[in-house]
Image: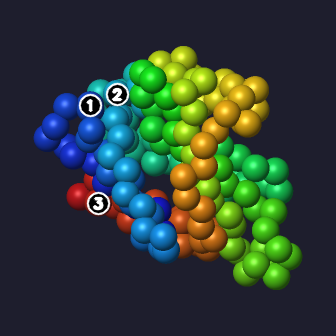
Amino acid sequence: MIRIIYDEIGDAHNDIFLKVDTGPPFLKVVDSYYLGDFLKQDFESKEEVVLGYLEYFKEQILCLRDEQTFIAVDLSDEYVGGFFISNGVKSLLKKKGVIRVEYGSTTKISGWGVNEETIAGQVDGCKDDFSIDREWLISKDAIIDSLNWSIDKIRK
């Protein structure tokens, strides 16, 4: 499960809690500051920005192909961090809907300099510069369910 919880009262810094609930456990606190620019949309509120981002994240998982996909989640002035998602795990696991998820970051890209259209090319250009912090095998259905949980929590 990958859950994204946001602090609706705080400002746009250190306001999103990214939690992976499978071993090894992972918690990262990130900013929503650049998410609206990343999505190339104007939003009325921080809530709408986070909902837009969650829908983007969910769409990336639903459209996953055999090639590796990068989903940015930590857009900072100094670096970009996110999930490398790969459908290309062993065939038995693939049949069961299990995907490989890795969290990595690089200082070669800055959060203010990317958007959903340019991120793939920028990541491909410096893929070797990413440091991978964690790795999991997670069911695609579990990720979608947890993103839906995150969306439902915000809409309440």
Residue 114 seen in the current view: yes
- Residue at the right extreme of this rendering: 91
Q: Secondary structure at mark 2?
A: loop
Mark 3 vs mark 1, CA separation in Å: 18 Å
Residue at 69% x, 25% y: name it: 122
Task: Using a 10 Å C-alpha cutoff, classify the residue at mark 2 as few (fewer than 14 neighbours), some (14 to 19) or many (20 or more).
Answer: many
Q: Nearer the viewer, residue 128 or 90?
A: 128
Residue 58 seen in the current view: no
| Residue 25 vertical position relative to residue 9 in the rendered view, above or below | below
Q: Amino acid at mark 1?
A: Ala
Identify the residue position indicated by label 1 in the image: 12
Task: Using a 10 Å C-alpha cutoff, classify the residue at mark 1 as few (fewer than 14 neighbours), some (14 to 19) or many (20 or more).
Answer: some
| Residue 41 vertical position relative to residue 149 in the rendered view, above or below | above
Q: Amino acid at mark 3?
A: Lys
Mark 2 vs mark 3, CA separation in Å: 20 Å
Identify the residue position indicated by label 3 in the image: 153
Expressed as whole percent of the image width and height from the top left, the position of residue 42 reads: 40, 22
Query: Which of the two labelled residues, at mark 2 and mark 3, occupies the earlier sequence position?
Result: 2
Task: Using a 10 Å C-alpha cutoff, classify the residue at mark 3 as few (fewer than 14 neighbours), some (14 to 19) or many (20 or more).
Answer: few
| Residue 53 vertical position relative to residue 59 in the rendered view, above or below | above
Expressed as whole percent of the image width and height from the top left, the position of residue 30 reads: 35, 41
Identify the residue position indicated by label 2 in the image: 33
Q: Are marks 2 and 1 in contact (CB under 8 Å)?
A: yes
Q: Is residue 91 left or right of residue 69?
A: right
Q: Are marks 2 and 3 in contact (CB under 8 Å)?
A: no
Disc number lying in front (3 or 1) = 1
Query: Which of the two labelled residues, at mark 2 and mark 1, occupies the earlier sequence position?
Result: 1
Expressed as whole percent of the image width and height from the top left, the position of residue 19 reads: 39, 60
